[in-house]
Image (cartoon, grey):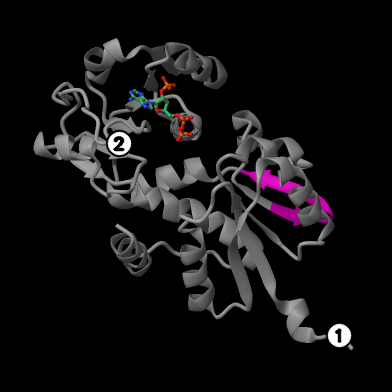
Amino acid sequence: MCDSRETLTINAFVAGYPIKHSRSPLIHGHWLKQFGIDGSYNAVEVHPDNFREFLSKVKSGEGGFAGGNVTIPHKETAFQCADKPDELATELGAANTIWVEEGNLCATNTDGHGFIANLDERHPGWDRAGKAVVLGAGGASRAIIQALRNRGLKEIHVLNRTVERAQELSDRFGEKVHAHSMAALQETMQGAGLFVNTTSLGMDGSEIPDFDFSPLASGAVVTDIVYVPLTTPILKIAEQQGFAIVDGLGMLLHQAAPGFEKWFGVRPQVDETLRSLITADMEKHA
Ligand code: ATR
C-alpha cells in the first residue's frame, strides 16, 4: 500500500566537501517550520570523486530529492552536469542551486541575487554612485561582478593580487568591468559608491594593508562577503573612517530564498528572526 505521507514529503539538500559548517540547514529548517511544510533540508558531504554520480541520482529521482544547493568545491561541476542551466549560471560557469523538472537537471546561481538583495535591504540607494570597487577575483567575486553589471552599474573595478584573474573577469563580463593590480587601490576608489571585499584578507590574523577609504564618494558603502566575524577587519576600518558598512550575513540568507521557493513552492522572507537565529548559532560556535 502506498504511504501518502511519503509522497507528500519534499526533500532538498546542500552538497559540499566539507559541509559540516554549513548554516543552510538552519536557514531552510527555519522556513520549513515557519510554513509548516512537510519537508527536509539536510547537509550531504559528497567527495568530488562522487559528485557526478550524486547528481545523476538526484536527476533520476533515486535520492528522493526535489533539488538542492551546491557549494564549494562543486559549483562548476554542477553547472557542467546540468541539462538546463539558466543564463546566469551559463555566463558564470557555476551553479549553486539545482532542481529537477520533467526529468531534466536545471541549474541557476543565486549568489549574485543574495549579494544585491542584502545591500538593497541594509542600505537602500547604495547604487546611486554607479561606480564600484571589488577586491578579489575568485569564485565569489565572479557572481558579484555579474550581479553589479546586471544591476546597471556604470563602472566596476576589480583589483586582485594576481592581476590575470581580474583580467579574466573583465574579459568575461564586458567593457564595464576594469581589471587592476592592488596598486591601483586609491585611484580606483575615487568617487566610488561601493567597496566590496571578496578576499580573505586579514581573516587569518595576518596584517591587512592600511586602508584609506577617504577617496570613496560621500555616503559610500563598504561591504564584505565574509560573515564570521560579522564585522570583519576591513569593515572595522571602514566604520572607524565614518563609512556605512554592510556585513555579509544577509548575502547568505538572501541567496537561499530562490532555492527554497523552487523546491518547496513558497517564497520565504529574510527577516530579523532568521538573522538572530544564525547569529546566535555563530556565537554558540565561536
Ligand atoms: P572564493 O571562491 O571564496 O572567492 P578563491 O577563489 O580562493 O575563493 O579566491 C580568493 C580571493 O582572495 C582571490 O582573489 C585571492 O587572490 P589571488 O587570486 O591573488 O590568490 C584573494 N586573496 C586571498 N588571500 C589574499 C591575501 N593575503 N592578499 C590578497 N588577496 C588575497
- Examine the image and state in which quarter residue 200 appears: top left
The secondary structure that most of the magenta stretch takes on is: strand
Q: Residue at x 21, y 16 (%)?
A: 186
For disc 1, the neighbor class at 10 Å (few under 14, some 14 to 19, many from 20) is few
Residue 265 located left or right of residue 197: right
Q: Which residue is mark 2?
A: 204
Q: CA distance from mark 1 to mark 2?
A: 54 Å
Question: Which residues, given as a range, are shown in magenta?
Answer: 99-108
Mark 2 C-beta closer than 8 Å to ligand 1: yes
Residue at disc 1, secondary structure = loop
Q: Is residue 102 magenta?
A: yes
Residue 47, percent from left and from top: 66, 45
Q: Nearer the viewer, residue 38 or 191?
A: 38
Label 2 SS: loop
Q: Quadrant of residue 258?
A: bottom right
- The kind of residue tagged 2 is Asp
Picture quarter with ligand 1: top left
Residue 145, image x and y in percent? 46, 29
Q: Is residue 120 magenta?
A: no
Residue under label 1, please give it: 2
